[in-house]
Amino acid sequence: MIIVMKPHAPEEAVKRVAGLVQAKGLETHLSQGKEVTIIGVVGDKTKLSNENLTMLPWVDKLVPITESYKLSNRKFHPEPSRVKVKEHEIGPDTLTIMAGPCAVENEEQLMTIAREVKKSGAQFVRGGAYKPRTSPYSFQGLEEEGLRYMAEAGKEYDLCTICEVISEEAIEAAAKYVDMIQIGARNMQNFQLLREAGRSGMPVLLKRGLAATIDEWLNAAEYIIAEGNPKVVLCERGIRTYETSTRNTLDLSAVPVIRQKSHLPVIVDPSHATGVCAYVPPLAKAAVACGADGLMIEVHNDPEHALSDGPQSLTFPAFHQLMGELEGYINLSGRTL
């Protein structure tokens, strides 16, 4: 449920209503707009059954929320959220570009890629130090050694850094080296990992699960936010369908649907969605056109010999060309890099 206060309600009136709700053992979350303040209520609302809240001064109305997710719900937080990572802000005014290899292979490789994606305009370097692969015989990542290389690349080229984590231990290690952690598609409903990510306090990129509905995805985000960490960014990376021409099927409709259902920023990963580098540029442009707050794109210095996901990785010239072609879409969307 949300309690909508009347326009320009004084702070004392808001505190009085929130205090009454809290006294009944429920949690409150304030969302303050330019004119209207909304008090989100989480908990057993039957405890308020004897309280005629609408009779209180400055209370406009009560709005029930039927969705199971509350804190990630746009009704709780009508204004779009902005997630700050170092000095960069992910949200409605900017287009965030996260680029780099699927897996960190060695220091020289990562430093080379970081230098080139920075030249092309990316604000983040991405790279996997922990790789949950389908086959146990595939390259599994350099783990903490890879995280150290990420920290060095970020510092050398003034880039934000992001890396996937797969366990509580990985979160603890990542917190020492990178600026943002990623929960991958396979772990979207690993609820203990989501809780630990929330407790870390770090900005979190939450990828959509392989066959997850949008409501399931938002409920996963709820686990993180419920631990007191609102710094969550969603990432659409394709879902499993009957189609085999691409690795997954990129659900671009998820972007406007998320915009309607949630206040959280949402970015798109066309690389994992398609698995084919030739399909990445057109889908990247489409993602910006439909309102995505950013893109996650795999870039490699030698895709033919990449240890992970070479076929979907862009070369440096291809990435530079894409960034140039995106300029018109960025301008039309009213954003800046």
Image: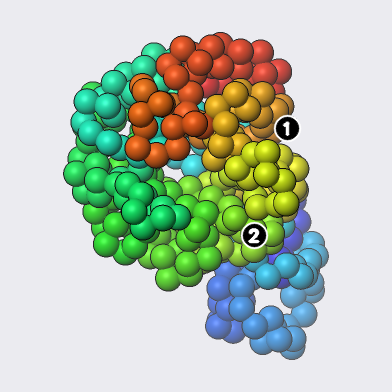
Q: Amino acid at mark 1?
A: Cys
Point out the tag, 1 or 2, that comes first from the N-terminus: 2
**Which residue is identified by label 1?**
290
In the picture, the disc for residue 212 is 2
Judged from the image, the secondary structure of the residue bearing numbered disc 2 is loop
Q: Is residue 100 left or right of residue 256?
A: left
Q: Residue at x 44, y 19 (%)?
A: 315
x, y percent for residue 7: 74, 51
Q: Is residue 307 above or below residue 130?
A: above
> How far is disc 1 from disc 2 in space, using C-alphas?
21 Å
Which image quadrant is residue 128 in?
A: top left
Q: Is residue 259 visible?
A: no
Closest to the observer: 30 or 132?
A: 132
Q: Is residue 122 above or below residue 91?
A: above
Which image quadrant is residue 163 in?
A: top left
x, y percent for residue 160: 36, 33
Report the quarter where the N terminus lies: bottom right
Q: Residue at x 73, y 32 (%)?
A: 290
Which image quadrant is residue 283 in?
A: top right
Q: Which one is in front in this view, the residue at disc 1 or the one at disc 2?
A: 2
Closest to the observer: 276 or 26?
A: 276
